[in-house]
Amino acid sequence: MEWTADVSVGDWLRERVDDPWRGTFHDVVPRGFEAYARILHPASVQSRPNGAPLPPSDEWVGMSWQQSQRLVADLVTHPATWAETAAAFGTTLHPLAQWDALVRSPEFGSNQMTSPDGRWFTAPVAGELDPQLLPSVVRLLTAHTSAPDDVVAGLWEGRGGLLGHLGRHPSRAFFQAGDPADADLARHNRMLGSSFSDRFNSVFRKPSWQEGILSREISEGPRLALPERAFVLFRGRAAEFTVDDWQTRMPWRDRPAEAMGFEPGAQSPSLFWPADRAWVMVSEVDFDSTIVGGSRELIDAICRSPDLEALRLPADASLSWGADEVNR
């Protein structure tokens, strides 16, 4: 994939999304396709090897660091489908299901809930498709376009650390987790925090270029502007995403994180479409699912895929927090 400054290739998206927003998924996903699929992002579930129930969240919060770490060391973590989650909480999976309603959370944005059988279910990642699932999705997409060698991938500009900027504060900071009683660690995190909030010294500091994942040329380059969102665009071949190690081949590979000890990685595209506009894939930053619009044949293939948990999505559907009337 190579960066493209020609953001006009995405003008057709602007013409087919709702502006102003109307509260449906068409606020971010173009209208006009025969069918749509909602690919549910995987969740995760944690349990003890012996099957003993885990403590409720309020008890977990009251534990000391040492107690919590002993408990975490014994946990077994597995991916969890939305169907498995619904079965554990006695709720119903359907195309407009919302995670908070599925796990019977009394409030919006619950990251972790304890099921009646004492397992911890952690919410799916919002904003991007699981990198390990992307090759499977792209293989299906590739079979339904006449232009597999000319695709566009867009990255939402608001992703932390993606873009550099001219300023006094770094594009991203890496706080270290650990025992709060560790004096050296606490001192490190305090110093890191003050680098953002020290207004007494920062006022005399001249703005300088703060590096991001992408180069300064790309960071200061043009964006595809859609309602409420803007994207950096790259162009290349769909096959670049069908290999298992696709993340290491992308120009937005997160090398700064790797330098801090993280595994090699790169975010999945926020937008993805071929030159013939046969389909579009959208991973909206606020959605815990990825939406694909395309032909009925493509949507059928996605919903039948054993690698994916996907449901047909009716046009004009809402994916807002209160849209799940079945599990309300």
Image: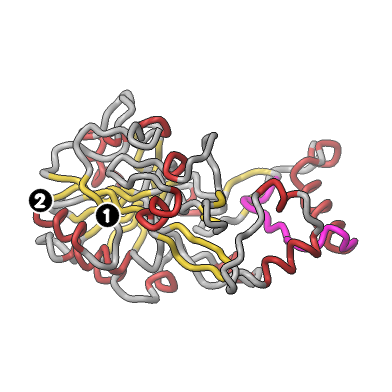
Asked where in the image residue 245 lies, by quadrant, the reply is: bottom left
Residue 154 placement (x, y as % from top left): 35, 51
Crowd rating for badge 1 (residues with CA inside 10 Å; few <14, some 14–19, many 20+): many
Residue 110 placement (x, y as % from top left): 55, 43
Q: Which residues are magenta?
A: 169-183
Q: Residue at x 42, y 69 (%)?
A: 247
Circle 2/circle 1 CB separation < 8 Å: no
Residue receiving disc 1: 310
Q: Residue furthest right?
A: 183
Q: Quadrant of the N terminus?
A: bottom left
The answer to which of 3 and 102 lies nearer the viewer is 102
Residue 66 placement (x, y as % from top left): 81, 64
Q: Residue at x 23, y 53 (%)?
A: 273
Residue 170 visible in this rendered orientation of the protein: yes
Q: Residue at x 29, y 44 (%)?
A: 94
Q: Earlier in the sequence, mark 2 or mark 1?
A: 2
Crowd rating for badge 2 (residues with CA inside 10 Å; few <14, some 14–19, many 20+): some
From this view, report whether residue 297 is shown above or below residue 158. below
> With 179 as the anchor, is 242 left or right in this view?
left
> With 325 as the anchor, is 59 left or right in this view?
right
Residue receiving disc 2: 296
Residue 212 placement (x, y as % from top left): 56, 56
Q: Residue at x 40, y 65 (%)?
A: 131
- Amino acid type shown at disc 2: Arg
| Total tally of numbered discs in the picture | 2
Main SS type for the magenta part? Answer: loop
What kind of element bears circle 2? helix
Q: Does 146 lie within the magenta span?
A: no
